Amino acid sequence: MPKARLFGLTAVSAAALMAFAISAFAQVKELHVMHAGGQWGDAVAKCVDADLLKEKDIKIVVETPGGYAKLAAQAKSGAINNVSTDGSTSELSRMAAEGLIEEIDWAAIDPKPMFDEAKNKYGFGSSYYSTIMAWRKGVPAPSNWVEFFDTEKFPGKRALPDYPDYVLPFAAMADGMTPEEISKGIDLDRAFKTLRRVKKDSIWWQAGAQPPQLLKDNEAQYAISWSGRVVGQEGVETSFNQGMLDVSWFVVAKGATDEQKKMLYQWFHDQTIPEKQACVAQYISYPGPSPELEKLLPKDKLDQFPTYSENKKVQWLPNGDWWFKNAAEIEKRWNEFKLEQ
Amino acid sequence: MATVSEVGEAYVSGHQRRWEGFGFLAPLLLFALIVFDVPLLIVVFWSFNDPESGFPSLGNYAAFVEAGSYARIIWRTFLIASEVTIATALIGYPLSYWISRLAQRSQLVAIGLVTMTFWVSILVRTYAWIVILGNGGILNRWLQSLGIVSRPVEFLYNEGGVAVGMINVLLPFLVLPLYAAMRRVDPRLIHVAETLGASRLQIFWRVFFPLTAAALGASMVLVFILSLGFYITPAILGGGRVPLIANMMDLLINKFARWEMAAVNSVILLIVTLVFYGLYQRLRERAA
Amino acid sequence: MSEELHSPRRQPFWLTALGLLTLLFMCLPVMIVVPMSFSSAQSLEFPPPGLSLRWYAAFFGNEVWAQAGVNSLLLAMLASTIALILGTLAAYGLVRGVFPGKALIEANFMAPMIVPSIITAVALFIVFAKLRILGTFFGLVLGHTILVIPYVVLIMQVAIRSFDVRIEHVAATLGASRILILCKIVLPNLLPSAAAAWIFAFVISFDEVVVTLFIAGTNMTVPKRMFNELIMQINPTITAVATLLIGFNILALALILALTRRGAHLRRGIV
């Protein structure tokens, strides 16, 4: 081969390899996590991650969405790409039951004052949120879950979360279970009965941004959605009645290195600072678990918050123990159901 | 007197060993073995892997047959693939025929357009159908503004919408080879038929169509094979309600972490693909 | 002779109508997406109410898209280059070589094009996971390379086949080794075809979605992000990305055509 061509080829290869090596190197001080993203994710990026990068040189790289299934798939593949994910109380219980996560070292986090209910052996409580019903302005308004899943009296498509944790309780209530019964346990048969009944009218969403979009585009007329995405949105009506109030937990994936855990705990610590929580609350109505937060919240938007007393009254909290005990059964039946589509 | 090239050829063949030229293949062969062949073999092994005992067994295949859900999805995939193939052929054959009979310059433009659409990324093409067929999309707005319907028609998130998207993507795969085959039809045969007094219709059905039938068959088989493996279009236009084999395999790997069943599905899809590919090759040889 | 016998006759009206409609159907996506990328509206509206470059600004200004673009470019360059080197060597061996099992080996090289990409995706996922290279950029390069190899081998086979073998015989008579013949005689004349093959591979790698979705891990590429965005929310920024991709693909196609034409001229010029 002529010398010039050989030299050219070598130069290009060397440049490529260098770029490749640099990109590999640059990944050292990055912390890869998964969470629901969206407005909450953007708010946290602005209010927490930006300062973390400036002060401590830690870059938070987010993959959306997160959740139980992705963590389980990641664990099985052996490639722990993401060190943490968010999840509901039920997802937290299932993750713990399946041995996917490690215990939280609260001493290492050294958090600012937090409500006790947001401190779990396996989870770091980062915010309160609700899962509620929403519908397009103009269609008949459902007042409870029986009506929500009644496709005859309330015709239209339902946008439902593609996660057992966020849809099974409501489906069971549609078959007649009460919130008190739900807090003891969910009758899976009744839940799946409802879901199979409305199968033709269901559209499944995976990202929190989808339900309000589907409602706006008129692809769905009713939706189960996370509260911050839909309350106060134009053209969308919501109700906290019989909604699920919950804490959004962050976990530590089993197999995370000490270095990664250190960065993760630093990120958790920063999230407990009341001023940062107030900053996040400006963008989306998911309050953090700081006792100091209440006085910093915007007064005119208080009724949008899931923890607001009027809203809190009509909601219920999930029972982590039940989800822990029945984790395997839930997974099996959900997979079967999904494959029936 | 021997020419230079004859001497050269003798020189080369004299120096030929049994594995002449193999060295050039060796690097790629090694690469392909490691990155492609071995992984496929491993998938086959996984399909026989019993997660509990760790010994090979037919248990996964038994589970595959028992669980109605897999069969249902495979059946639906075959059904949609067949419908799409037939529709593509019905639309694509007239198009190829029409193009092949245009003026030279128009032919170039038309084939250029077809080739151009073929080159556009499948994501882009699939996405455009959301804009067109969605409830708030162009078609619905147009229908509603004309008063033809009062509420939006559900074009998306069902088999129909997925099929339309698939046909749109697959048409070039049928049109381009078919057009090439049509151009190869010996025009003298047509002339002879005309001279003998055959009508236009007779010429088409008894002369032209039989000559292009093999190419049409080959293209249809190709479209069918491609349809079986479709992932993106059903994922995006189906909204999770039209899972085909590929989408199911995605669920099995990325959501349910059931690698064994994904492997079983892979093996079955692979065997079916290879069988039809053999058919495709045979038809292509007949068409040439 | 073929010109006059293929001369256009008047085609039946219904056939022309059908042909035009079908052609319209095929071009519809492009015709819709491109104007929409210049739309000033917040949501998907067609025809766009006004013109604006805001979605292009949104794309170029967004850090995630920028990272995805860089990754895609780097990935495509690496995969195409490796594929070109390995594939050209192999194509030469396939065309000029004589040894048992050649057909089988050729089929092996073509296989990634025939096997549905979902199967390749699953296979690589499982193997890469076990080898602990799942989600690495290195794994992505491997995956993309094997996917574009068939196209490179095909194109280079055609190019080498149309290169007059007698010239190689002459060189052999003069004492040149096979390697020397390949590097100093065959390759320089195949440069246009090689460039075309490289561009072809580049575009295929750049547009690759399915295998990437499975093995990329946290590495973001342009198609991967587009797919995620499409599944999750209809953000008009996608129309800008789509239009850029269309322009990019068409440019590549034009380049390839120009190169193959030049290559044909070159080869004709030799004999």
Image (cartoon, rainbow, N blue to C red):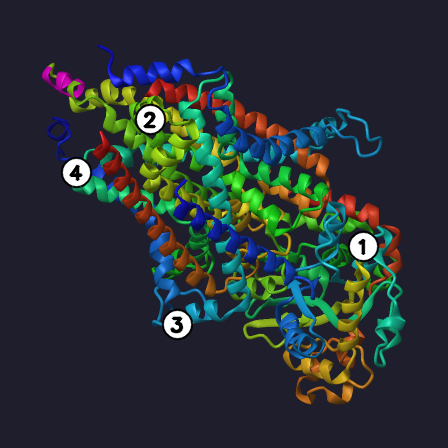
Residue occupied by mark 1: A255
What kind of element bears circle 2? helix
Residue occupied by mark 3: C40
Secondary structure, magenta segment, majority class: helix
Q: Quadrant of the N terminus of chain B?
A: top left
Percent position of residue A340, x then y? 66, 41
Percent position of residue C57, x then y? 44, 71
How crowded pointer 3 is (Cα within 10 Å; few <14, some 14-19, many 20+) is rated as some
Spatial CA distance of label 1 from label 2 is 61 Å
Spatial CA distance of label 3 from label 2 is 64 Å
What kind of element bears circle 3? loop
The label on residue C171 is 2
The label on residue B104 is 4
- Residue B164, by quadrant, is top left
Going by the numbered disc 1, the residue's amino acid type is Gly
Q: Chain of mark 2?
A: C
